[in-house]
Amino acid sequence: MNPSQFDARESVLDAEVEAQLCAYNSAFDELGLRFRWDARTLASLAMIDGEEAQIAAYIEMHHAHLLNAYSVVFLSRAILEKKNARYPARVPMRVESALPLTDVVHQPKTTSRREPVSYEIALPALAGV
């Protein structure tokens, strides 16, 4: 494969990853979930077989408090259904480039000094899913 073919293949993969991320992040937003995935998160989950299992692992690892109100199966299926409505294809990820799930970087919530800080757990609005 010559360099231009390699670059074209990489840009197609980048576009696929962006479409996948947009679909996931839109699904989270539609369901009222405060998740935001990036390419690194998607790559870290690539070691897990199946999109529903990937979503479930992410929830269990990073948002376990939601499991007090919803089952992991319900949440992962609701997310996957919304994601697939926008982008049903699954991006083939290179497992060798995947990062361990513990390496996922969280984006801290920024607050202004005027904004009151609440430590209450807010559950997402999933009614009617």
Image: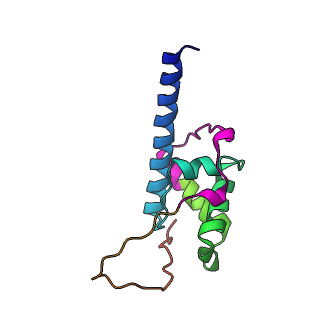
Q: Quadrant of the N terminus?
A: top right
User: Residue 41 vs residue 122: left or right?
Assistant: right
- Residue at 65 percent across and 45 percent down: it is 98
In the rendered view, would you say 92 is above or below 29? above
- Coloring basis for residues: rainbow
Of all residues, the one furthest to the top in this rendering is 2
- Horizontal side of residue 49 vs 37, given as left or right: right
Image spot of residue 84 (x, y percent): 53, 48
- Where on the picture, by quarter, is residue 71? bottom right
69 shown above or below 126: below
Numbered range of the magenta stretch: 82-105
Residue 17 sits above or below residue 66 on the image: above
Residue at the far left in the pictured view:
114
Q: Residue at x 30, y 81 (%)?
A: 113
Residue at (71, 50) in percent of width and height: 48
Name the spot of residue 38 as percent of width and height, x first: 49, 51
> Residue at point 63% right, 51% down?
44
Residue 32 vertical position relative to residue 80 in the rendered view, above or below: below
